[in-house]
Image: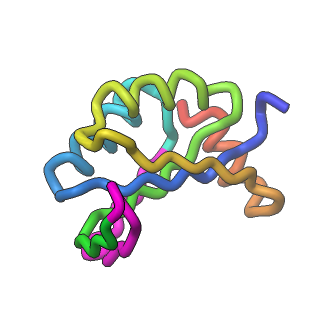
């Protein structure tokens, strides 16, 4: 359903790239809101090595209808070779807030 609200997760290597992405996505109306969570410690396997990095986590609120454009824009701006972008449908929530995400004005 195109008006389904999505919560998207994306990690960034630093404050500057996270802020740039957040401002671009909200400014271009691809997301209603982006929360930045600093100092997330991520451990992952990359190119046959186990790596631990400090990152900033973005929690992006958007709709299924906006997701394709959001994805394209995020991938074009993101500094990582392989950016994380995971979208999870919001099953329940405060209805007025979810309505706002669908139409932030």
Position of 87 relative to 45 (above/below): above
Classify residue 62 as left or right of residue 90. Answer: left
Which residue does the image show at 40% across and 36% down from the upper left? Answer: 26
The colour scheme of the drawn protein is rainbow
Q: Quadrant of the N terminus?
A: top right
**Magenta stretch: helix, strand or loop mostly:** strand
Which residue does the image show at 78% across and 28% down from the upper left? Answer: 2
Which quadrant of the structure image shows residue 90? Answer: bottom right
Q: Position of residue 10 (x, y in %)?
A: 43, 52
- Magenta-span inclusion, residue 47: yes
Which residue does the image show at 39% across and 44% down from the upper left? Answer: 83
Q: Where is residue 36 in the image (x, y as percent from the top left)?
A: 34, 61
Q: Where is residue 22 in the image (x, y as percent from the top left)?
A: 33, 44
Classify residue 8 as left or right of residue 90. Answer: left
Position of 2 relative to 60 (above/below): above
Q: In which quarter of the image is the C terminus?
A: top right
Classify residue 81 as left or right of residue 2. Answer: left
In this rendered view, identify the residue nearer to me: 8 or 81.
Answer: 81
Which quadrant of the structure image shows residue 92? Answer: bottom right
Q: Where is residue 16 in the image (x, y as percent from the top left)?
A: 14, 50
Q: What stretch is highlighted in magenta?
A: 33-48
Q: Residue furthest front?
A: 48
Which residue does the image show at 27% across and 66% down from the upper left? Answer: 55
- Magenta-span inclusion, residue 61: no
Marks counted in the figure total: 0
């Amino acid at each position: 359903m195109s008006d389904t609200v999505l919560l998207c997760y994306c990690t960034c290597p630093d404050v500057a790239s996270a802020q740039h992405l957040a401002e671009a996505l909200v400014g271009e109306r691809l997301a209603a809101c982006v929360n930045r969570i600093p100092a997330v410690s991520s451990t992952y396997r990359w190119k046959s090595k186990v790596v631990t990095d400090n990152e900033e986590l973005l929690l992006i609120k958007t709709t299924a209808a906006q997701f394709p454009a959001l994805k394209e824009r995020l991938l074009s701006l993101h500094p990582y070779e392989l950016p994380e972008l995971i979208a999870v449908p919001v099953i329940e929530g405060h209805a007025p807030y979810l309505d706002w995400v669908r139409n932030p004005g």
